[in-house]
Image (cartoon, rainbow, N blue to C red):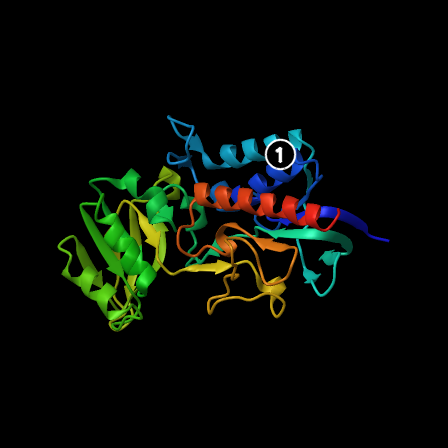
Amino acid sequence: MSETHNVVIIGSGCAGHTAALYTARANLKPLVVEGHEPGGQLSMTTLVENFPGFPEGIMGPQLVENMRKQAERFGAEYSMAHLTSADLSQRPFLLHLGKHQVHAQTLIIASGASARWLGLPNEHKLIGHGVSSCATCDGFFFSGKEIVVIGGGDSAMEEALFLTRFASKVTLIHRRESFRASKIMLERAQQHEKIQFLTDTVVEDVYDPSLHEVTGLKLRNLKTGKVWDFPTSAMFLGIGHEPNAKMFAGQLDTDSDGYLKTHNYVMTRVHGVFACGDVQDRRYRQAITAAGSGCMAAIEVERFLEEHGA
């Protein structure tokens, strides 16, 4: 017989930890399934300067570790497991955590969204040191510098336009000559004096992990085959994110890109199942908004259990 929990939380980023803190303080004894990226995207960042309460900033891994300790202090239980499948057709919900399974009276999905990367040899070594997937998080660190944005859709155009607030020059690199971006976004980027375009070009590597900072890129032109080094201070990925929601396919509503659809902020179409953070937020994707939605989901869980006599 598997264990039955009042609430199971999938994910251990800002949204998951905040939901754990609030449900633990409500004496609901939440079980947090850490998932395949414990700590979420903050675990791969360096200095976080825009989370309220830390005037000197705080390292991303330290921030999520503090959140975890705070939730554990009130009784949240953490499991290193990864959700492999779920049956939401009846309550309590059945969750498969590898070979282990648990039942949940309520479920909070805070599994986040994983940034799409290029798969370069040195890419992951420089994440947080000049390689980034979040312009609003890291753009400030490159004030007055020349930087690069990779991509050809609206996300890339938005990143490039935002980064012109800080960078002296933004080079947008795209593997094709045509762009997927909407006409209005493409025109805005093309007309901006700080943005230049480099098309039919791919990045083959990023330098220099030995210096713990980005100093340049190795580029290749797809038409001519020319390979050259391109100096830059940062590489921002504008190729989108992948929401971690595939395990709920066919059971919960998603948009065309796989983000979970919610109403009243955090409610899914299945009663007792709530979603928060980047798995349902494709617009803001900030630590503070993820934490806020985690709080909302926790409060809704508490109300749901009270209404259903738990």
- Indicate whether 175 appears above or below 265: below
- Locate residue 187, reporting x and y percent: 19, 65
Corner quadrant of residue 152: bottom left
Front residue of 86 and 124: 86
Q: Which residue is mark 1?
A: 71
Secondary structure type for disc 1: helix
Please indicate, yes or no, whether residue 129 appears anywhere in the rendered image.
yes
Could you tell whether 85 is left or right of 2 in the image? Answer: left
- Looking at the rendered structure, the number of numbered marks drawn on it comes to 1
Q: Is residue 121 left or right of residue 299?
A: left
Along the horizontal axis of the image, is 122 left or right of 88? left
The image shows residue 73 at horizontal and vertical percentages of 65, 29
Which residue is pictured at 42% across the width and 28% down the height? 54
Vertical relation: 45 (above or below) 267: above
Q: Residue at x 43, y 57 (%)?
A: 282
In the displayed structure, 260 sits above or below 64; it is: below
Quadrant of residue 55 within the rendered picture: top left
Q: Quadrant of residue 302?
A: top right
Residue 205 percent coordinates (x, y): 36, 55
Q: Residue most toward the top?
A: 56
Query: Which residue is nearer to you in this view: 193 or 29?
Result: 29
- In the image, 290 versus 130, the foreground residue is 290
Q: Amino acid at mark 1?
A: Ala
Relative side of 126 to 38, left or right:
left
Tell me if I can see residue 151 in this picture. no
* Mark 1: few/some/many CA within 10 Å (<14, 14-19, 20+): many
Residue 271, x across and y down, in percent: 65, 59
> What residue is at 26 percent from the left and 73 percent from the top?
178
